[in-house]
Amino acid sequence: MNGLIKRVEKINKECVDSADKSKQLNADGTTDAFTLLRRKIGLDIKGVKELITERDEAEINMPGSVRTVQLSHSIRTAIQDLKGECGKLQKMHDKAEQRYLKKNKEDPEKLKKLELTKESCEIAWGHVKELELQNKKRGSDTNQFIPRDSSSPRNGGQIKQLPDLDHEDFIELIKTDKQIDGVLTSISEQLKVTENIANEMGKAAQRQGVLLDDLDKKAEELDEKLENLNVRLGKMLKDIRKADRFMIDVILVLILLGVGAAIYGVVKRK
């Protein structure tokens, strides 16, 4: 009877947890696929840990029971599902990293985000490894587990602890993403304003260019007119000089004639 009651309570809890899980995944309105999958993996990891705890308790109280076998099967299936989800999470990170490297353009914010998504993948794989070892221990002290890691939890090396997938670094990542989006939006608006100003300056420069071209053309025409005027003045001066010389020549001739006439008159009197 107690076993039946526990099973009913378990089914009820699973139904409630399923509804709560959907709320937790979209708790802050984040919709990007990587974040949603990471959160789902985090919740699934907690669910498997609870199953392992329940299986270990059932094995102590009812060793070899049908319930223990069912829980063990559920744990193995859940771990396999987690591996598939971790593989999808890893592919998302790898594709994002490839896109970043392909652009060959340094971006500190994007690089920081890639480092955090890489850490998400490593922690997720580390939790899967931990769950597999805890499942094999079957009731022993799981707190003594020490996950191993180098560049990825699937390889060698060692780390001191394995944080939850929703630890402060990832929460900070979400906040940083929102701040980045806000800054980018502001920059985009400022760029539009700058573009409009540049367009207006370009139009003004074109108008000024037309005015300057007109001024240059008029200056050339004025220079040409001045040059023609100088030529005409030069000719006029030459003509004036010619007239002056003619008058002088006439006066000299008249003087000479007068002098000659005077001389002739004097000579004739003698």
Image (cartoon, grey):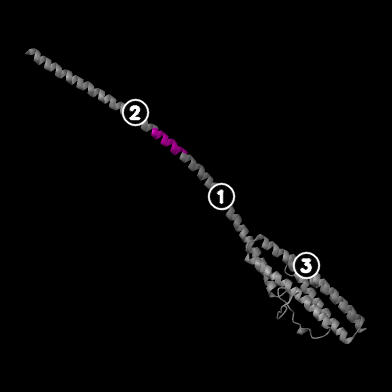
Which residue is identified by label 1?
A: 200
- Under tag 3, what secondary structure? helix
Residue 88's disc number: 3
Tell me which residue sits at (36%, 33%) in the image: 230
- Which amino acid, by three-letter code, is at mark 3? Lys
On whether residue 243 falls in the magenta region, the answer is no
Image position of 171 (left or right of 216): right
- Measure the C-alpha gap from mark 1 to mark 2: 53 Å
Which residue is identified by label 2?
A: 235
Q: Which contiguous range is marked in magenta?
A: 217-227
Q: Quick one: 29 or 47, which is closer to the camera?
A: 47
- Under tag 2, what secondary structure? helix
Q: Quadrant of residue 87?
A: bottom right
Q: Residues within 10 Å of mark 2 (few under 14, many from 20)?
A: few
Q: Which comes before the other along the chain, label 1 or label 2? A: 1
Q: Which comes before the other along the chain, label 3 or label 2? A: 3
**CB under 8 Å between callouts 3 and 2?**
no
- Which amino acid, by three-letter code, is at mark 2? Lys
- Measure the C-alpha gap from mark 3 to mark 2: 97 Å
Tell me which residue sits at (23%, 24%) in the image: 248
Predominant secondary structure in magenta?
A: helix
Image position of 212 (left or right of 25): left
On whether residue 224 falls in the magenta region, the answer is yes
Q: Quick one: 241 or 43, which is closer to the camera?
A: 241
Tell me which residue sits at (83%, 81%) in the image: 136
- Which amino acid, by three-letter code, is at mark 1? Glu
Q: Quick one: 93 or 151, which is closer to the camera?
A: 151
